[in-house]
Image (cartoon, helix red, strand yellow):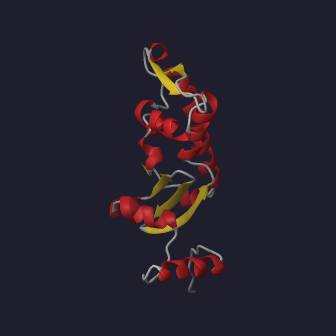
């Protein structure tokens, strides 16, 4: 008896053709396409991690993609349509700041974990459309905006992961990558 297990990633041919045409207009040639989670996993995972079983989560600006490796092979990949850019938008909307300033605040002061004294450490937010006016909020307030969105990202990824026990039985490791993974506390929340 001969059997096989296969894994395929689908994409619309018209999308790939349009992308290839665009790239060729730049005097470049496309050899092949690869799924984004697969490419990220190839960049950051060790061969031993792939062999022993690992889930790689790539938190980008617009989405959080994942790749599941088991016994050295890609077993599953996918993603959720939320990412670190959504955290930036939340900060901008709640504190009335521009997207650029919200991104800067997230990068410099943002955390998913509240630390001692964070309610007494303040961050200024120049108000969008009102030159010279700033709003002040504590780092604890900033954390209260970041944490729920980061939790949502991980919950949405977890909902997409395969549920069968055989495939996930040996998975004991999660690797975070991408810009969103650089947030203080992302590892602990994951």
Above or below, 112 relative to 152: above
Q: Which residue lies furthest to the front in this view?
A: 131
Q: Position of residue 107 (x, y in %)?
A: 43, 37
Q: Residue furthest bottom?
A: 1
Give the quadrant of residue 160.
Answer: bottom right
Query: Considering depth in this image, is 69 or 89 the residue closer to the camera?
Result: 89
Question: Which residue does the image show at 55% across and 64% down from the upper left?
Answer: 76
Note whether residue 188 is visible: no
Question: Which residue does the image show at 60% across and 79% down from the upper left?
Answer: 18
Q: Where is residue 146 in the image (x, y as percent from the top left)?
A: 55, 33
Question: What quarter of the picture does the N terminus occupy?
Answer: bottom right
Q: Position of residue 19 (x, y in %)?
A: 56, 76
Question: Which residue does the image show at 52% across and 28% down from the upper left?
Answer: 126
Query: Considering depth in this image, is 32 or 2 the residue closer to the camera?
Result: 32
Give the quadrant of residue 5.
Answer: bottom right
Question: Which residue does the image show at 47% across and 66% down from the upper left?
Answer: 38
Note whether residue 182 is visible: yes
Above or below, 173 relative to 7: above
Q: How many marks?
A: 0
Q: Where is residue 14 in the image (x, y as percent from the top left)?
A: 65, 80
Above or below, 145 relative to 24: above
Give the quadrant of residue 53.
Answer: bottom left
Query: Considering depth in this image, is 28 or 43 the residue closer to the camera?
Result: 28
């Amino acid at each position: 008896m001969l059997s096989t297990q296969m894994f395929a990633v689908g994409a619309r041919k018209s999308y790939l053709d349009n992308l290839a045409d665009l790239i060729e207009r730049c005097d470049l040639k496309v050899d092949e396409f690869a799924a984004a989670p697969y490419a990220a996993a190839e960049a950051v995972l060790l061969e031993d991690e792939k062999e022993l079983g690992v889930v790689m989560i790539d938190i980008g600006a617009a989405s959080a993609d994942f790749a599941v490796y088991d016994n050295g092979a890609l077993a599953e990949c996918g993603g959720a349509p939320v990412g670190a850019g959504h955290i930036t938008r939340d900060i901008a909307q709640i504190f009335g700041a521009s997207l650029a300033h919200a991104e800067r605040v997230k990068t410099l002061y943002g955390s998913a974990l509240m630390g001692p004294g964070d309610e007494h450490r303040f961050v200024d937010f120049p108000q969008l459309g009102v030159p010279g006016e700033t709003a002040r909020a504590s780092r604890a307030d900033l954390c209260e905006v970041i944490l729920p969105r980061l939790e949502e990202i991980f919950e949405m990824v977890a909902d997409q992961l395969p549920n069968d026990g055989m495939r996930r039985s040996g998975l004991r490791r999660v690797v975070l990558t991408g810009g969103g993974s650089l947030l203080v506390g992302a590892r602990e929340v994951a």
